[in-house]
Amino acid sequence: MSRLAVLGASGHGKVIADIAGQTGWKVIDFFDDAWPSLRRNSHWEVVGNTSQLISVLDQYDGVFVAIGNNSIRLIKLIELEQANAQIVSIVHPAAIVSVYSHIGKGSVIMPGAIINVDVSVGDGCIINTGATVDHDCMLGRGVHLSPGVHLSGNVTVSDNTWIGVGACVRQLTSIGTNAIVGAGAVVVRDVDSDKTVVGNPARILNRK
């Protein structure tokens, strides 16, 4: 664990770089498609864009996509996978992750998060600060659990779904693809794909 390339010079990217430094990565370089107008991300240098990263993959021991938008993160993850990038996951030392769980490539587990036994976290997921995922949960690709989210046991969250800050999900509940769960929502029944739910209990948000 010597050189890490981080694609996405954002606030989320800063958090990833900070965690990576705490977990042993010695050199951390940022790449972002706003380069060359964007040259720094706080304490770290931005050295190129996506195409340039792909051209120098052999110079890095690992690559991480640090883009908050689920859809864009997955697109970039797939692009880098096709270029044979060494995609890595990042786990903060203050997170608790069961040895009997699975963490997919390109996923991050933030400080204070808890991943319990027999959980499967897909590729490119964000398990944010203080989120908890109880036993036998299944998370697809590109899922974002915001800070303080709590999933009870046997919850399924499908690809590209975002669950807002402080939301709770009852056991044995399924949330579909591309769904959004609002901040503080309490989900007590299944959520269909492409739906947004808010409130306690969570109900579908009717957009005018």
Image (cartoon, grey):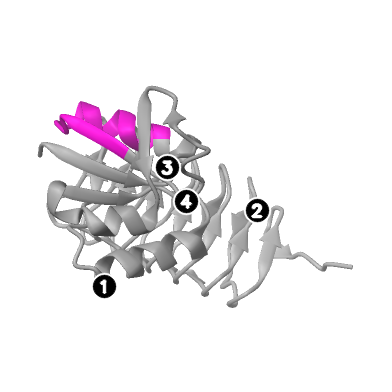
As shown in the figure, which amino acid type bears the numbered disc 1?
Gln
Task: Left or right? Give the position of 15 relative to 71.
Answer: left
The label nearer to you, 4 versus 2, is 4
CB of mark 1 within 8 Å of CB of mark 2? no
The label nearer to you, 3 versus 1, is 1
- The image shows residue 207 at horizontal and vertical percentages of 83, 67
Going from N to C along the chain, the mark reached first, 1 or 2, is 1
As shown in the figure, which amino acid type bears the numbered disc 3?
Asn
The label nearer to you, 1 versus 2, is 1
The Cα–Cα distance between marks 3 and 1, rounded to whole angstroms, is 27 Å
- The image shows residue 121 at horizontal and vertical percentages of 30, 61
The range drawn in magenta is 14-29
- Is residue 11 covered in magenta? no
The Cα–Cα distance between marks 3 and 2, rounded to whole angstroms, is 15 Å
- The image shows residue 190 at horizontal and vertical percentages of 56, 73
Q: If the image is split into quadrants, where does the N terminus sit?
A: top left
Going from N to C along the chain, the mark reached first, 3 or 1, is 1
